[in-house]
Amino acid sequence: MNEIINIGIATVDAIARTVDRFPNPKELIFFDKLDITTGGCAVNCAIDLAKMGIKNSLIVKLGGDMLGDFVKSQAESFGIDTSHVIREQSNNTAFSFAAIDKNGERSFLHTVGTNGTLRADDIDLDFIAKHKYCYIGGVMLMPALDGKPLAELLKRIRSRGVITIVDTVYVLERTDRWQQVIFPMLEHIDYFVPSEPEAQAITSLTKPEEIAESLQQRGANNIIVKLGEKGVYYRMKTGENGYAKAYNVSNVVDMTGAGDAWDAGFLAGLSMDYTISQACLLGNAVAAFCIQSAGASTGIKQMNSIIEFQNSNS
């Protein structure tokens, strides 16, 4: 059986480049290229793991539309177990239009679709319990699951001996809304891995050390804050803490999926019994591959290539 299961949001992404501004009403603006890819934290992480050579499973909710067919077939083409993917015939699969500017930064238009109706009772706990690690990605974009329902699900998952890893998506919400969603689940998450903007939104703090300490005071176990080009900061329940530096790359094409790529690398490290610092560095390396290609998973390579890259850039 696969060791890792990925649960959360799934989208189809239409990625347009280069878009340095949006048109005014009735105005037509041309862009250079359009790529259609799968997206969403859970799908990205699953595909990234598969491309590294790590078998895994996927639970997401898709519409009964061609976009849902596309996501499921793409996942299956990478050998991902989609046996517990949920289809909601009356709804549409989530869709994002991503506009990439000349600096590789992204702006999004998004429809939530079936990500908005994923519920705890859609998810087969017995199937999850067959895995060692459960990654849940897309918190803040799953309104029927976020907050107390997800906290209860995480509690039940951990009671079955499964290690939980949770990531969020940055949305423009007040701090009290972030805390309403995140605080109930913190004690049931083994590794909480938000980005720096997400962690700041939750805590209203700016320094990674203070953020991690604050979250642990709220019941969190192990915290890793992703800092973009600065790498990551980690603080474990044991008190172990430190920074893992990012790898420098000169050809940054697209930041789409970089955080999900980091999550996949970190999960891979855990599954290979890496230390926390080693797993964080592997996450940094996978993210470095991600940002050098268009699309969330296009640039991910086999594990031996990633380790070779690490060794040549150590």
Image (spheres, rainbow, N blue to C red):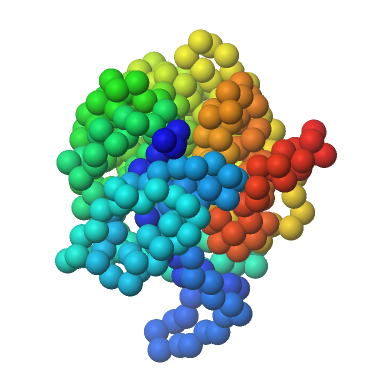
Q: Can you tell which quarter of the image residue 181 is in?
A: top left
Q: Can you tell which quarter of the image residue 228 is in?
A: top right
Query: Of all residues shown, which one is farthest toward the front?
Result: 1
Q: Residue at x 39, y 32 (%)?
A: 131
Classify 80 as above or below 103.
Answer: above
Q: Is residue 67 left or right of residue 79?
A: left
Q: Is residue 198 left or right of residue 130?
A: right
Q: Residue at x 47, y 21 (%)?
A: 222
200 vs 226, nearest the viewer = 226
x, y percent for residue 197: 48, 41
x, y percent for residue 8: 35, 46
Classify the position of the C terminus by image quarter.
top right
x, y percent for residue 118: 24, 49
Q: Is residue 241 left or right of residue 168?
A: right
Query: Of all residues shown, which one is farthest toward the right?
Result: 312
| Res 304 visible | yes
Number of callouts = 0
Q: Can you tell which quarter of the image residue 166 is in?
A: top left
| Res 21 visible | no
Classify the position of the N terminus by image quarter.
top left
Q: Residue at x 60, y 73 (%)?
A: 18
48 vs 102, nearest the viewer = 48
245 vs 306, nearest the viewer = 306
Classify 142 as above or below 227.
Answer: below
x, y percent for residue 311: 79, 35
221 vs 52, nearest the viewer = 52
Q: Residue at x 42, y 28 (%)?
A: 132
